Amino acid sequence: MLARRCLAEAFGTFMLVFAGTGAIVADHASGGAVTHAGVSMVFGLVVLAAILAVGSVSGAHINPAVTLAFAACGRLDRRALLPYLGAQLAGALVASLLLRLLFPADPTLGATRPAGSALQSLVLEGVLTLMLMFVIFSVATGAKEQGLAAAVAIGAVVGLEALFAGPISGASMNPARSLAPALVTGSLPDVWIYVLGPVAGALLALPLCRALHPPGACCAATAAPVARVPEEVCR
């Protein structure tokens, strides 16, 4: 049922935003006890956990950019596109609202902001998401389509990218993760970077996957719903 899949996407995205941005908030509240490396590890581990927990229900996109890329290549029924996007944003917003209740004094709730120029962060977010989406496409092909192996690979990429790029762009790679704290705190001027960059990067991963993998490995000829961890294989 689509409703069950959307609920899985909402809760998976809630897990990501609550744990990931919550780690940033906790780091601020504790005077740096979590550390940047700790925050990066939290993001990677919560993505791994979400894929294993809800991947068999919805595919565990937990990211509007990922959902758009899968819809573009036929791995997701286009009729499920808007419900998935709405569920992801709703889950992220609930997580940020709960963090606001728990930490009312925190000014940003882990919102992503560029440390340098907007163009620098835009390009960085696009490249980071391109790498992430290419890995997602790749671990869902052929013999590599193993739930745990795919979850570890995807979680590792998220943690790795957060570790080295977080101080510059925030390493969002996820419009819902950036939109939710921005909406709750009113920090909207830079949020376009974290929508445009990840969406463009995820969509660019599709021709790259087609260029490097055998014909038919990346996308289905017809749209089909996601059914198992981490994504439905399309041949």
Image (tube, rainbow, N blue to C red):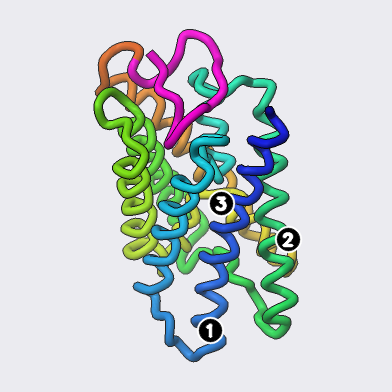
Which image quarter is the N terminus in?
Answer: top right
Which image quarter is the C terminus in?
Answer: top left
Residue 117 percent coordinates (x, y):
48, 61
Q: Is residue 217 above or below residue 112?
A: above
Disc 3 crowd rating (10 Å Cα; few below 14, some 14-19, many 20+) is many
Q: Which mark is residue 194?
A: 3
- State which tag comes first along the sequence, 2 or 3: 2
Disc 3/disc 1 C-alpha distance (Å): 22 Å
* Nearest to viewer (mark 3 / mark 1): 1
Is the C-beta separation of discs 3 and 1 under 8 Å? no
Q: Is residue 36 above or below residue 68?
A: below
Q: Which mark is residue 183?
A: 2
Q: Amino acid at mark 1?
A: His
Tell me which residue sits at (44%, 44%) in the image: 126
Q: What range is drawn magenta here?
A: 217-235
Q: Which residue is mark 1?
A: 28
Tell me which residue sits at (32%, 25%) in the image: 141
Disc 2/disc 3 C-alpha distance (Å): 13 Å
Disc 2/disc 1 C-alpha distance (Å): 20 Å
Q: Which secondary structure lies at badge 1?
A: helix
